[in-house]
């Protein structure tokens, strides 16, 4: 099996308003794999990590985490063991955090590689 090059990334999350926040921009022929994330909401609401063809627009969204109910001040997170991702986005699509009602701070980290 051929070795794939993995480009590591880590993003800080600090939403100023509820809605969509692009975590990693779309890259043609590439997939974004999440190794871990931590979200700390400022209010009760919902959050989801998803792939999106047009972030903030009329694109197609594929939710990977399911819609998570979040509670003010209660951290929500996940960390993979080793280099196996907890979720993998769709090829060529942006990785997006979408929140409803609450805004969140925190971080996400992972890698991008060829599909």
Image (tube, rainbow, N blue to C red):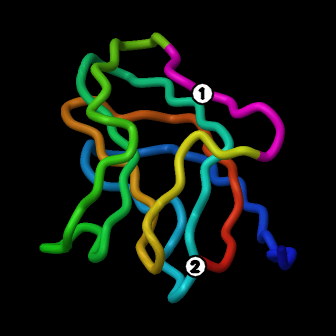
Q: Which of the 4 quarters of the picture holds residue 113?
A: bottom right
Q: Is residue 11 magenta?
A: no
Q: Which residue is mark 2?
A: 30
Where does the C terminus fall, quadrant-wise?
Answer: bottom right
Q: Which residue is mark 1?
A: 78
Determine whether 76 is above or below 2 in the image: above
Mark 1 Cα within 10 Å, few/some/many (few <14, many 20+)? few
Q: At 65% from the left edge and 79% from the top edge, which residue is drawn?
A: 114
Residue segment shown in magenta: 75-83
Q: At 58% from the left edge and 79% from the top edge, which residue is drawn?
A: 30
Q: At 54% from the left edge and 66% from the top edge, which residue is drawn?
A: 24
Q: At 26% from the left edge and 17% from the top edge, which residue is drawn?
A: 44
Where does the N terminus fall, quadrant-wise?
Answer: bottom right
Mark 2 Cα within 10 Å, few/some/many (few <14, many 20+)? some
Give me the C-alpha separation between circle 1 and circle 2. Answer: 23 Å
In the rendered image, residue 22, in percent from the top left (x then y), is placed at 43, 62
């Amino acid at each position: 099996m051929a070795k794939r090059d993995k480009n590591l990334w880590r993003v800080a999350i600090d939403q100023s308003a509820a809605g969509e926040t692009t975590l990693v921009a779309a890259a043609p022929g590439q997939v974004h794999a999440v190794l871990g994330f931590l979200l700390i909401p400022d209010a009760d609401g919902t959050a989801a990590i998803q792939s999106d063809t047009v972030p903030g627009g009329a694109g197609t969204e594929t939710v990977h985490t399911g819609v998570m109910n979040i509670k003010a001040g209660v951290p929500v997170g996940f960390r993979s063991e080793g280099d196996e991702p907890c979720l993998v986005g769709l090829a060529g699509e942006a990785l997006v955090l979408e929140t409803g009602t609450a805004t969140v701070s925190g971080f996400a980290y992972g890698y991008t590689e060829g599909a």
